[in-house]
Image (cartoon, rainbow, N blue to C red):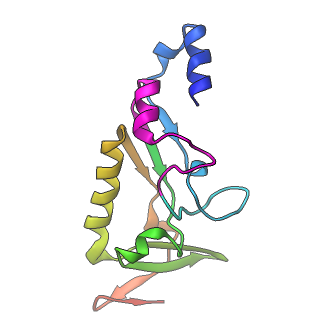
Amino acid sequence: MTRVAQALQRQDLLKAVRIWQLDDWWYPGHPAVWVYCVENWTLIPPAFNKSLKELSAVLGKPWLLYVPFFCPSNVYMKQFKFLHGSHGATAFTVPYPDDALAFYRMLFDYGMANGLSVLLLRPFPAVVPYRLIGNQPVP
């Protein structure tokens, strides 16, 4: 990514870049060809040797960070409750309503501390068929 920025700078094109987007492919997730769910929304080696904050400082631009869906085995399950759902054979999880505010606040706080300008979340209810009756998940 820094090499891309350096090449853009050499061609006097970097000033046209207003924001950098990191799609879900960069985060640890399901080992498919594409990442349809995120296990850990942080940048870790071998894909990244710098933090988001360090990369934001090097690139001199804010981030648009994308989050599709969280995997049923995500690292946040120790701290927050999640509801599990699926779309065909693909399993996803969303924060339990009682934990949703704290969970998304944690994501925003992490992002803002690391150069976030925009957080793009995929619309969970459209693809995760679950419902609550009396605060209990019902398949």
Q: Position of residue 18 (x, y in %)?
A: 43, 24
Figure quadrant of residue 91: bottom right
Image quarter in which the N terminus is found: top right
Q: Which residues are magenta?
A: 41-63
- Residue 55 is inside the magenta segment: yes
How would you classify the magenta stretch by its main secondary structure? loop
- Say which of 89 and 101 sits in front: 101
As drawn, 128 above or below 133:
above
- Say which of 2 and 13 sits in front: 2
Q: Position of residue 114 (x, y in %)?
A: 36, 41
As drawn, 132 above or below 74:
below
* Residue at the image point whose x is 69% and y is 63% from the top: 31
As drawn, 14 above or below 110:
above
- Residue 40 is inside the magenta segment: no
- Say which of 105 and 79 sits in front: 79
Q: Position of residue 116 (x, y in %)?
A: 36, 40
* Residue at the image point whose x is 47% and y is 56% from the top: 41
Q: Position of residue 101 (x, y in %)?
A: 26, 65
- Say which of 43 and 69 sits in front: 43
Q: How many marks?
A: 0
Task: Please indicate whether residue 12 sits to the left or right of residue 107 in the image.
Answer: right
* Residue at the image point whose x is 61% and y is 24% from the top: 4
